[in-house]
Amino acid sequence: MGDSTSEDFFNDGYMDREKLRTLTNLIESIDCKYCILSHADPLTKSDLLDYLKSILK
């Protein structure tokens, strides 16, 4: 997922929240147990979704 879940540091921290919401919905629809968020350790799908939803608040 890489940069799709963080602010654009070269564009004043802009984040396209609608694209992130679309990505979150897509992840919710995928049958998996774990996801890898960039350079971090693998997360459970539910932990990743909780994190992404917290960004959208």
Image (cartoon, rainbow, N blue to C red):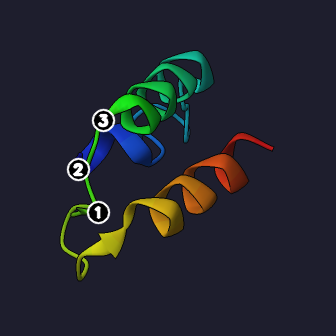
Asked whether the residues under the numbered discs 2 and 3 touch, taking CB atoms below 8 Å apart as contact, a structural biologist would say no
Secondary element at image label 2:
helix
Q: Give left or right: position of 49 versus 50.
A: left
Mark 2 or mark 3: whose residue is earlier in sequence: 2
14 vs 5, left or right, is: right
Of residues 40 and 25, the one nearer the viewer is 25
Which of pointers 2 and 3 indicates the residue nearer the eye?
A: 3
Residue 2: give its label: 2
Instruction: Name above or below for residue 14 compared with residue 46.
Output: above
> Is mark 1 in CB contact (under 8 Å) with mark 2?
no
Task: Identify the residue at image location x=71%, y=55%.
Answer: 54
Residue 3 position, x and y percent, is: 28, 44
Measured as percent of width and height from the top left, residue 6 is found at 44, 48
Could you tell whether 32 is left or right of 20 in the image?
left
Residue for point 55% across, 41% down: 13
Q: CA distance from mark 2 to mark 3?
A: 18 Å
* CA distance for labels 1 and 2: 18 Å
Residue matched to label 1: 33
Amino acid carrying mark 1 in the image:
Lys
Residue at numbered disc 3: 30
Amino acid tagged 3: Ile
Q: Position of residue 52 (x, y in %)?
A: 56, 50
